Image (tube, grey):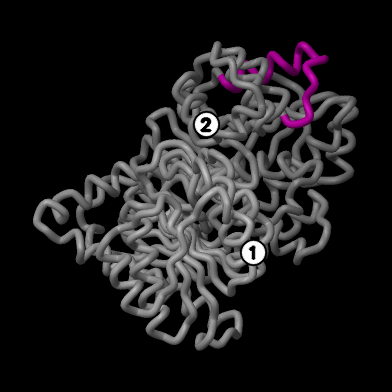
Amino acid sequence: MISAYTGTQIREAEKPLLDSGMGAVLMQRAAHGLANAIVAELRSRGRRLYGCGVVVLAGKGNNGGDGLFAAAQLAGRGMRTTAVLASGSAHPEALASFERAGGRVQILTEANIGELAAHAGNADVVIDALLGTGAQGGLRGPAAGLVSVLAGAVRGLVVACDVPSGVDSDTGEAAGPVLPAHLTVTFGGAKAGLLADPGADYAGHVRVIPIGIEDGLPWPALRRLETPDLATLLPNPARRSHKYSRGVLGIVAGSRAYPGAAVLACQGAIAAGVGMVRYLGPPDVADLIRQSCPEVVCSTGTVADTHVQAWLVGSGMDGSDGGQMQLVRDAADSGLPTVADAGALPALPDVLAPQVVLTPHAGELAALLKRLGAGLDRAAVEASTLAATRQAAGLTEATVLLKGATTLVASPYQDFYSQADGTPWLATAGSGDVLAGVIGALLAQVGSDVVRFRELGIDPDERWAAIAAMAASLHGRAGAAASGGAPLTAGRIAEAIPGIWDKVSGLSNQWPRQRNSHPHRLR
C-alpha cells in the first residue's frame, strides 16, 4: 500500500533530525536520490549520460539546494549543467558545490526570460527545484514568466524536485503557472498532493526516495491500494459456498430515458463476483435486463421484503418515478451497505451513514455541496478535489467516492484513498454505472468481513472507503486492459473484470501481508 503524507507531516518527521544537526545529511540523501533517479530515467529512455545538457531551475531555499547538489553530482558524470537562479541567490553550500563541479550559473531577470527559456527548452533534462513543500501560493515574478514560456515547450525530460513548483503538497491544488513533470522525485514519503487532482496532472511518474525519516512518519494522510492489497482483500468463494453466502445485491436503477444504465450496473455487479442480483424497477427496464442479463432476478416489491446484503441505487434514474425514488430512500435507510449513484444523490437525506457510498462526478459533487450550503461550483471542485471530497464526507457522514482521472475516496472518519489505475478511455457513457455495480458487488461480498481488512491495518469502521477504493482499482484496471490504448465501451469494462480478478487473485501468495509500507517507486 502506498502511503502519502502532507508536507507538514514530512517536515514534522524531519524536525528531530534537523534539531540534531543532520540537515546537511538529509539534503545530501535527497540530492543523491534525485541524481540517481534522473540517471535511471535517462537510461530507461536509451539516452547516453555523457554530454547531456541539464538545466536546474533553483529557488533560494532547501528545494533549490537539493536541485543544485543533484546537478553537481550529474556534472560529475560528464553532463553539461546550468543553474538558473530564480531570485539571484541560492543555498550557499549547494551553489558552491555546483560551481566546483563546473556548473554554469545564470541569474534570472525579466530581461533574459526568453534567452534562458530557449536554453532550458533545448536541454536534455530540466530540474524544477524552485518551490518546495513549504511554499505558499505559486510562482511569482521572473520565475512565473520563465515557467509560463517553458510549459509545453521543453523537448527533454522534466523532473520535479519533491513537488512540481506551484502544486500544494497537502491538497494537490495548483497555483499556475506550473511546469508539468515527466517524473517527480519526492523525499521521505509520497506527498498527498501528488496523488490528488489537479496536482497529479503535473506530477507524472512519482518516485519516493527514503532519506531516514520514514520511521518517524505518522498515519498517512492518503493511501493507495496496490496489487498485493487487492490480492488480500478480494474475496474467493469457499468450497461449500452458495449463491446466498456469496452475497446478494439489490439494484434499484434505470428509467425510461436511461434503461441501459441499469443493465450496465447489473453487468458490473455480476462480473465482480456477487452471488445473486435482485432488480427492482420499471417493467420495461426489467424486460431489457432479462434479455441482457438472464442471471438477474427481476421482481417487484419493497426494500423491506427484498432479502439482500447490500443495495445499489440511482444509476440512470431521472427522478420521474416517485415509487422508484421511495425505494432509493428506503434502501439508504435500511442500515445495509448501499452505493448511491447519479439520480439517487438528490433524493437522499443530508445526513447518512458510513456504509452509504456516494459516487458523484465533479458536477454532481458540486450540486451536493451546494445543497448542503458549501456553495462550490464544478470548477472549484475540480480545482481542489481532495478538499471537496473531504468536505462532502464530513457533511453527509457518508463515504464519498469522487470519480475522475484520479478517483478519491473519503470516509466520514477522514480516512482517504486515491486510485489511478485506469485510462482516459474510461471517460465513456456507462462507465460509472459499471463502477457502481462493482462497488455494490464488493459491499455485498465483504462488507461484513472485518478480518481481511484488519490484516492490512484497516480499521473496520473505515472498511467502506477501502471497499470503494478496491472497486475503483478493479474497474480502472479492467478498463485499461479492455482498451489497450484504443476507444472503449462500458460493456467491455465489465467483460474484462473477471480476467483482472483472476490475475490479481492468482498473485495472492507472492507477497507478505504487511500493515503498512513505504514503497520507493510509484508506477
At x 69%, y 40%, the residue is 277
Q: Amino acid at mark 2?
A: Thr
Residue 330 is one of the magenta-drawn residues: yes
Range shown magenta: 315-332
- Position of residue 495 in the picture relative to residue 97 (left or right): right
At x 58%, y 65%, the residue is 120
Q: Amino acid at mark 1?
A: Ala
The local secondary structure at tag 1 comes to helix
Q: Which residue is mark 2?
A: 389
At x 54%, y 16%, the residue is 374
Return the mark for residue 118.
Answer: 1
Q: Quadrant of the N terminus?
A: bottom left
- Position of residue 443 in the picture relative to residue 134 (left or right): right
Q: Is residue 350 above or below residue 267?
A: above
Can residue 446 be seen by looking at this rendering?
no
Dominant secondary structure (helix, strand or loop) of the stretch shown in magenta: helix
- In depth, the one of 420 and 6 nearer the eye is 6
Can residue 9 be seen by looking at this rendering?
yes
Question: What percent of the width, then of the height, locates residue 22?
Answer: 15, 61
Total tally of numbered discs in the picture: 2
The crowding category of the residue bearing disc 1, from other C-alpha atoms within 10 Å (few below 14, some 14 to 19, many at least 20), is some
- Position of residue 323 in the picture relative to residue 311 (left or right): right
At x 43%, y 67%, the residue is 105
